[in-house]
Image: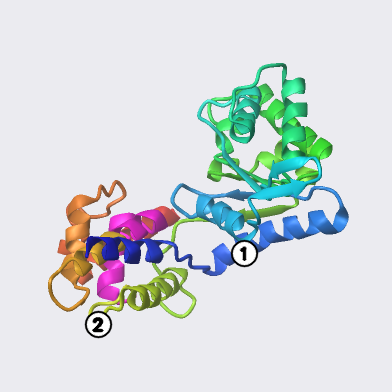
C-alpha cells in the first residue's frame, strides 16, 4: 500500500504546469538553443526569479527533453554522452572554484592548475562529452552575493571567454538579484539577448489568473493519477485562498502542501476522497515562513483568508 502511495505522489510531483510566464521562460531558453545552432555561435539566456518559482525545475526539464544515449561509441573508444550539462554554483564561489566543481563533475576527480589551464581542461572535457548546452544555476553566488565589483566583472568576463572558446551556450539561472547583471559588461550583454523572469503568484481570479489556472491543471493531473473519487478541488476558492495565505504564492511550498494532503488522503482506509482536513493536516507539519495568518491557514474562514490576501497585496504594491 505504502509503495503505491509513493508511486502516485512521485508521478504527481513530476507534473509541470506551463502557465503563461513559465511558458515564456521556456521559450526564451529554447530560442537561445535554437539560435546557437542556426547562427553557429553561442546565443544565451538569463533566467531569474525568487527561490521557489520553478527555475531549477525548468533547467532539469531541458535535461530531460534533450537527453540521449548515455555513451558514445567511437573507433577510438567509448565516451560519456552528455548533451546537457547542469551545475549548481557552490556557495561562496570563485571562478576557479566553479571551474574546479564543473571538472569534478565531469572527470570525478579534483583538478589543479591556474584558471587558464583549468578552463582549457574544462572545454576539452565538455567537447569530449558532446555537451550542447550548459546550465549554471544559482549564478548569484558567483556574480552578486558578497562579491566585489571587480570579482563580479571577472566572473562575467570569464563566462564570455568560456562562450567564445567553447561555442557552447551557457544558460544562467539565479535569484532576482541577477536581473541587471547583463548591464555590467557590454560583451556579456551581447551574448545574453534573451531574458525571462519568474515570480511568485499573485491572487487573482478569472480566466487570466496564472494562480487558478495552475491549480486547475494540477488538480486535473492529481485526480487522474491518484484515481480520486469525490472530493474538494485545488481551484475551489475555499482551498485556493488558504493555500495562498500559507505560501504567499510560492509554488514550491504550494506543491509541498498539496503533495502532503494527497498522501494523507491516500493513506485513509476508505474511498479516496480529498478533504479540507487533509490540507489542514499538511499545514500542521510543514514550516510556513511566509504564512499570512498567525496559525494554520486552513483554520481560517474564507472571508478572513481573503482579507489577509487583500491586505498583503495592497502592502506589496506600495
Q: Determine the residue positioned at 30% across, 78% down.
A: 227
Residue situated in front as seen by the camera: 6 or 35: 6
- Residue ID at (49%, 76%): 208
The residue identified by callout 2 is 229
Residue 297 is situated, as x and y percent measured from the top left of the image, at 21, 60
Measured along the vertical axis of the image, is residue 49 above or below residue 313?
Answer: above
SS type, badge 1? helix
Q: Which labelled disc corresponds to residue 24? A: 1
280 left or right of 239 in image: left
Q: Residues within 10 Å of mark 2 (few under 14, many from 20)?
A: few
Q: Give whichever of 107, 305 is nearer the camera.
A: 107
Quadrant of res 276? bottom left
Tell me which segment is drawn in magenta: 235-257
Mark 1 closeness class: few <14, some 14–19, many ≥20 residues within 10 Å: some
First in sequence, mark 2 or 1: give its number: 1
* Residue 197 appears anywhere in the view: no
Amino acid at each position: 500500500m505504502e509503495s503505491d502511495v509513493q508511486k502516485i505522489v512521485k508521478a504527481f510531483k513530476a507534473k509541470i504546469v506551463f502557465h503563461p510566464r513559465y511558458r515564456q521562460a521556456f521559450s526564451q531558453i529554447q530560442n537561445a538553443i535554437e539560435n546557437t545552432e542556426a547562427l553557429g555561435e553561442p546565443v544565451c539566456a538569463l533566467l531569474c526569479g525568487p527561490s521557489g518559482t520553478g527555475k531549477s525545475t525548468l533547467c532539469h526539464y531541458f535535461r530531460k527533453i534533450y537527453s540521449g544515449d548515455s555513451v558514445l561509441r567511437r573507433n577510438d573508444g567509448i565516451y560519456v554522452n552528455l548533451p546537457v550539462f547542469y551545475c549548481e554554483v557552490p556557495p561562496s564561489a570563485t571562478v576557479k572554484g566553479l571551474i574546479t566543481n564543473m571538472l569534478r563533475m565531469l572527470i570525478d576527480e579534483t583538478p589543479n592548475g591556474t584558471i587558464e589551464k583549468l578552463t582549457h581542461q574544462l572545454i576539452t572535457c565538455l567537447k569530449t562529452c558532446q555537451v550542447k548546452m550548459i546550465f549554471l544555476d544559482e549564478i548569484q553566488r558567483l556574480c552578486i552575493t558578497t562579491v566585489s565589483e571587480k570579482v563580479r566583472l571577472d566572473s562575467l568576463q570569464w563566462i564570455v571567454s568560456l562562450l567564445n572558446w567553447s561555442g557552447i551556450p551557457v544558460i544562467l539561472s539565479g535569484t532576482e538579484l541577477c536581473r541587471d547583471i547583463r548591464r555590467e559588461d557590454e560583451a556579456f550583454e551581447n551574448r545574453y539577448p534573451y531574458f525571462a523572469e519568474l515570480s511568485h503568484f499573485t491572487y487573482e481570479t478569472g480566466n487570466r489568473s496564472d494562480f487558478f489556472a495552475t491549480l486547475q491543471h494540477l488538480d486535473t493531473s492529481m485526480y487522474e493519477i491518484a484515481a480520486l473519487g469525490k472530493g474538494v478541488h485545488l481551484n475551489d476558492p475555499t482551498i485556493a485562498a488558504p493555500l495562498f495565505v500559507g505560501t504567499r504564492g510560492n509554488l514550491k511550498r504550494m506543491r509541498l502542501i498539496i503533495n502532503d494532503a494527497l498522501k494523507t488522503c491516500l493513506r485513509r482506509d476508505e474511498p479516496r476522497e480529498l478533504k479540507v482536513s487533509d490540507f489542514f493536516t499538511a499545514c500542521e507539519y510543514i514550516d510556513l515562513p511566509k504564512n499570512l495568518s498567525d496559525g494554520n491557514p486552513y483554520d481560517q474562514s474564507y472571508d478572513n483568508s481573503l482579507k489577509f490576501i487583500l491586505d498583503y497585496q495592497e502592502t506589496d504594491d506600495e
